[in-house]
Image (spheres, rainbow, N blue to C red):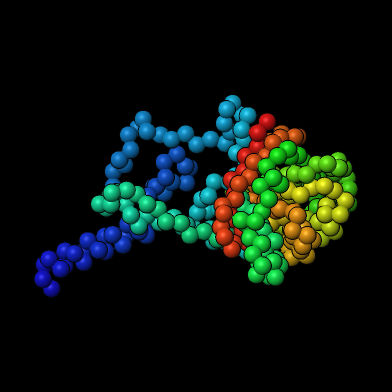
Amino acid sequence: MPPLLYFFLFLHSLSDAQTVAYPPIPGTETAPDCSLSAPTTNKNLIPTRREVYDDGRIIDITHRYVTSMPAFNSNEGVGQFLWLPASMKNGSIANNSEMKLPAHTGTHVDAPGHVFDHYFDAGFDVDTLDLEVLNGPALLVDVPRDKNITAEVMKSLNVPRGVRRVLFRTLNTDRRLMYKKEFDSSYVGFMKDGAKYLVENTDIKLVGIDYLSVAAYDDLIPSHLEFLEGREHILVEGLKLDDVQPGIYTVHCLPLRLLGSEGSPIRCILIK
Ligand SMILES: [Zn+2]
């Protein structure tokens, strides 16, 4: 093989390697400690990563997307979802990451097309969700820790009429399930009769919960059907509700405008 060709092949394999590994991420506990190159960051260049802003007035209730976050029905977690095909260290004029992420990963929203195929075909995707429902006064409530959210539990919560957005904090938060790589099907969620009760007897339109599904595992599809059939309810799943006092806030949730997609990552914050 001519030496020059060999050299180019070598370079090519180097650039392939660059697209496989993603560099360590400063300021995270989970930054892989396997970089062979010396860190190029100055010791003074340490980013701040916050859960609250403005002295606690703004609370981030979105989970950070990390490779070890849980994926539904999997023990492997989300895994690598970022690649760096264009890298300045490899001669590119800018760094450009690429992302591949299931639409229902981490803190995310469900659109009616998620469980109704005719709604999917008709285009009821995340782009059609009502931003008015996703933004406004919201109640954060603690639900009983020893059971799923049934009609009886919904009744006992006594959510006043007129309340349109409720974030349900459950045992899932206490068990820190969103921080565990292995999917746990014993999470707390709505049973079918709880979902039906909410739809028929309350004014709640935004339903938020603290694990990957609003529906309990045993009623996975029936509960989703109750919520999404009328196309008035919006389900936000995988919320980060640690260290937040129960009470009234203003919630802001903004999904991506993924045309055609029945789910989307969503950024949610609470404002005191
Ligand atoms: Zn979902």
Instruction: Point out the image quarter for the N terminus.
Output: bottom left
Residue 30 makes an appearance in the image: yes
Which residue is pictured at 60% across the width and 50% down the height? 255
- Of 52 and 243, nearer the camera is 52
Q: Quadrant of residue 55?
A: top right
Rendered location of residue 272, percent (x, y): 68, 31
Which residue is pictured at 53% across the width and 50% down the height? 65
Which residue is pictured at 68% across the width and 70% down the height? 117
Q: Is residue 161 left or right of residue 251?
A: right
Residue 194 makes an appearance in the image: no
Placement of 124 over or under 25, stated as above or below: below
Rendered location of residue 84, percent (x, y): 37, 54
Say how many tags the image has. Answer: 0
- Of 174 and 97, nearer the camera is 97
Q: Is residue 105 left or right of residue 80?
A: right
Rendered location of residue 20, percent (x, y): 37, 60
Placement of 200 over or under 142, stated as above or below: below
- Of 146 and 63, nearer the camera is 63
Q: Is residue 238 left or right of residue 188?
A: left
Placement of 96 over or under 219, stated as above or below: above
Rendered location of residue 64, percent (x, y): 54, 46
Q: Quadrant of residue 45?
A: top left
- Residue most extreme to the bottom: 1
Which residue is pictured at 39% across the width and 47% down the height? 24
